[in-house]
Amino acid sequence: MVKFPVPKIDKPLEELEARRKDATALAFIGDAVHTLAVRSRLVEAVGAKTGVLHRLQSKEVSATAQASTLKRIESELTEVELDVYKRCRNAHQTTMAKNASAVEYKIASGFEGLLGYLYLIGSSERIAELLNKSFELQEQVSQN
């Protein structure tokens, strides 16, 4: 099993404080967390040149891929995680992805917001668990 290395925050926020953060700010943080986790995993697993790594990473962190990831793990989310995801998904968007539908972009924003929330409360292990579960499910689909 490939593990996702996930960054850890030095001073986690209280859950309530993190939940009060603006949904787009949570997504902003979550995007960085997801990108770093995917890049770290690719460097460990593939070890190719940066151009190849960038292309692989871009496929995994695109809005379409993130929406697909969320759909694979949605049943694994706790009630609080689901609430955070929905709040971030439903937040007003001023931009849209170039290569994804509006629905995929909203789902991806919700996914990023969830990762941002989990990062801010210090739940790196939970982020890794969700990303690993998604990756395992994707591998099973790819093999069939």
Image (cartoon, rainbow, N blue to C red):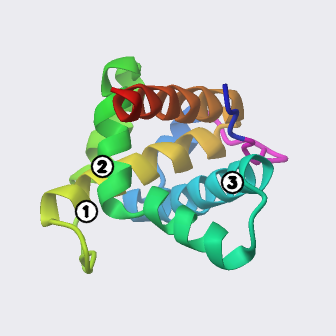
| Secondary structure under the numbered disc 1 in the rendered image | helix
The quarter of the rendered structure image containing the N terminus is top right
- Asked if the residues shown at circle 1 and circle 2 are in contact, with their CB atoms under 8 angstroms apart, the answer is yes
Which residue is identified by label 2?
A: 67
> Tag 3: residue type?
Leu
Q: Residue at x 26, y 80 (%)?
A: 98
**Quadrant position of residue 6:** top right
On whether residue 67 falls in the magenta region, the answer is no
Q: Nearer the viewer, mark 3 or mark 1?
A: 3
- Lower sequence index among marks 2 and 3: 3
Q: Position of residue 33 (x, y in %)?
A: 62, 55
> Tag 2: residue type?
Ala
Q: Position of residue 22 (x, y in %)?
A: 42, 59
Tell me the number on the disc at residue 105: 1
| Secondary structure under the numbered disc 3 in the rendered image | helix
Q: Nearer the viewer, residue 13 or 84?
A: 84
Tell me the number on the disc at residue 42: 3
Q: Residue at x 68, y 59 (%)?
A: 39
Mark 1 closeness class: few <14, some 14–19, many ≥20 residues within 10 Å: many
Q: Main secondary structure of the magenta part?
A: loop
Q: Nearer the viewer, residue 112 or 4?
A: 4
Q: Residue at x 21, y 57 (%)?
A: 104
| Secondary structure under the numbered disc 2 in the rendered image | helix
Cα distance in 3D space between marks 3 and 1: 24 Å
Describe residue 11's horizontal placement relative to residue 15 as left or right. right
**Magenta span covers which residues?**
5-14
Vertical comparison of 99 with 115: above or below: below
Q: Residue at x 44, y 62 (%)?
A: 59
Q: Nearer the viewer, residue 15 or 6?
A: 6
